[in-house]
Amino acid sequence: MGKEESGTPHWLFGDQLGPHFIDPAHGGPHRDAPLLMIESRNVLRRRRFHRAKAHLLLSAMRHRAAELGDRVRYVKADTYRQGLREAVGDARVTVHHPTSRTAHAFVRGLPSVRVLPARGFLVSHDDFEAWADGRASKQLRQEDFYRWVRRTHGLLMEGDRPAGGRWNLDHDNRQPPPRGVTELGAPAPYRPRESEIDDEVRSDLDRWSRDGDVEFVGDDAPRRFPATRREALAALRRFVEHRLATFGEHEDAVLAGDPTMSHSLLSTSLNLGLLDPAECVERAETGWRSGGVPLNSAEGFVRQIAGWREFVWHVYWYFDERYRTSNVLRHREPLPDWFTELSPDGTGANCLSHVLEQVRTTGWTHHIPRLMILGSFALQRGWDPRAVTDWFHRSFVDGYDWVMVPNVVGMSQYADGGRMTTKPYTSGGAYIDRMSDLCGPCRYDPSVRVGEDACPFTAGYWNLLHRHRDRFERNARMTRAVRGLDRLHDLDALLEQERERRADGPGAGRRR
Ligand code: FAD
Ligand code: SF4
């Protein structure tokens, strides 16, 4: 970096808060560069976010500014453009590659801003492109990418073989919840303590809401996720030392009385840039090598971060801007109000009601409720994938554009026709019944598809397969499921029932 750049200010976005975003040894700004942070009110005005999400973001930014002290100029402005003008005028600024396409286009369009490489991921854009372009098959598959990352980064490897001889331990990691328990019994996750900065954020959010300047959804509650590097490291340590060992086996299970089970709750810290993914996977590997963590748990966790998280990030950038509007299934139904309002009373389906309540109070659920309950329901009901993406983005504390677009458009709504997954992720009630304890108290029966007790997931599943039979039949992984339609003696009645449910309003499964 040139000598003149020691005085060039460096701009930190609100999701670039860890030390690796100001590290000159890794392509960051000069070590003496003054820093700039901009709190843009318009970001909150544009959409109706979960209040816990707005709180966490502002708290993390303000905590970081307090830590950086005189080195940072913290500007509160209506827009980034205004904040930048106020802080530096037309002077040169550096910034690390932002995480959304909108922010990236914005900084690239400013002649005074020099964009440094992205940080906070294991694989660079160039390396991903070389991997993707060099494949014989044009289809991008997470499993292939993950194995390549494991090899190239030497993660959980024994020589050139995967530790334990197998790349994929999903089979060991997809067990239903243990029988007869209401909790997994893992030690509780790390919980931060709020500071004066949180009080200040809360009173700002109250004032802005009162003034009608911004609108939120979801409950304001004590902050549950780390806002500082110190807190994030404590959360990582607690997870690796006390919870990682039991992460794997029941990773896909859901227990009503144990929302967090053995999940890490690290997504917010990773996405705010408080933690670097490299340190997370390295610590998990050390846990396994030192004998405290079984391989299936270490592998399951490394797969989530070095596999899924990286893959999703690169899919977001690799496909062009049109990817976000993909809608091959032509789903156009609007989301019902009870769903957008996070109102658990809007549905009689116990699983949905339970998960919505969790989202309302915390802004978080683990992967399976997102994919197999919320997302699967939206897919079966034919809700507009763009509206579903927007809903997830606004309602989840860890939601950012880069992570939501592939997870919702691709993984959960199959709106991209399989560009990043091998098949649609959806199921009937039997899967939810096997993997959770949510069906027992439900007014519906997961094994019933027609009639008063018909489970909306079971009926919705067959209805979806019928609607898209032509497309799904061409997918080798769906052929068997689609052929199952031919064995349904009551298919006509089921389709009629689902038509009526739709005519009754989009809140299928409404409480009666
Ligand atoms: P753990 O189960 O402990 O997993 C460890 C880490 O792996 C997570 O912290 C996360 O960083 C990473 N990870 C795992 N799967 C994914 C994935 N598919 N995409 C990206 N990272 C992944 N994750 C987000 O970080 N932000 C989102 O907005 C988000 N939206 C999602 C929407 C849908 C419809 C689905 C199906 C998944 C979404 N995910 C999202 C992925 C995943 O559900 C969350 O990362 C996870 O539940 C967060 O909880 P955790 O930190 O305890 O994760
Ligand atoms: Fe959900 Fe159906 Fe089970 Fe009820 S019976 S909890 S609606 S899957």
Image (spheres, rainbow, N blue to C red):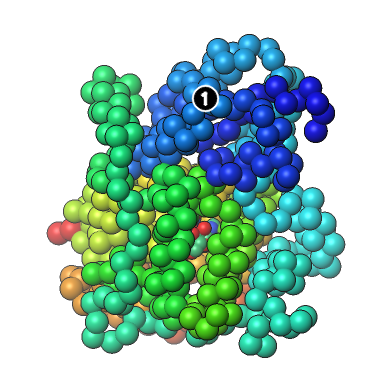
Most extreme residue toward the left is 512
Asked if residue 381 lies left or right of residue 15, the reply is left
Query: Residue 279: image x %, image y %?
Result: 59, 60
Up the image or down, 33 lies above or below 287; here it is above
Residue type, numbered disc 1: Asp
Up the image or down, 480 lies above or below 323; here it is below
Query: Residue 260: image x %, image y %?
Result: 34, 65
Up the image or down, 80 lies above or below 121; here it is above
Asked if residue 151 lies left or right of residue 378, the reply is right
Q: Is mark 1 within 8 Å of ligand 1?
A: no
Residue at the image position 62 percent from the left and 46 percent from the top? 20
Q: How many marks overall? A: 1
Q: Quadrant of residue 16?
A: top right
Q: Residues within 10 Å of mark 1 (few under 14, many from 20)?
A: few
Query: Residue 103: image x %, image y %?
Result: 61, 32
- For the residue pair 244 and 462, the one nearer the viewer reads as 244
Residue at the image position 25 percent from the left and 59 percent from the top? 353
Taking the image as drawn, is residue 111 in sight?
yes
Query: Residue 358: image x %, image y %?
Result: 28, 56
Taking the image as drawn, is residue 410 in sight?
no
Q: Quadrant of residue 497?
A: bottom left
Residue at the image position 32 percent from the left and 85 percent from the top? 178
- For the residue pair 147 and 334, the one nearer the viewer reads as 147
Q: Which quadrant holds the C terminus?
A: bottom left
Residue at the image position 47 percent from the left and 26 percent from the top? 39
Name the secondary structure under disc 1: helix
- For the residue pair 78 and 459, the one nearer the viewer reads as 78
Up the image or down, 53 lies above or below 109; here it is below
- Per the image, the residue denoted by label 1 is 70
Q: Which quadrant holds the N terminus?
A: top right
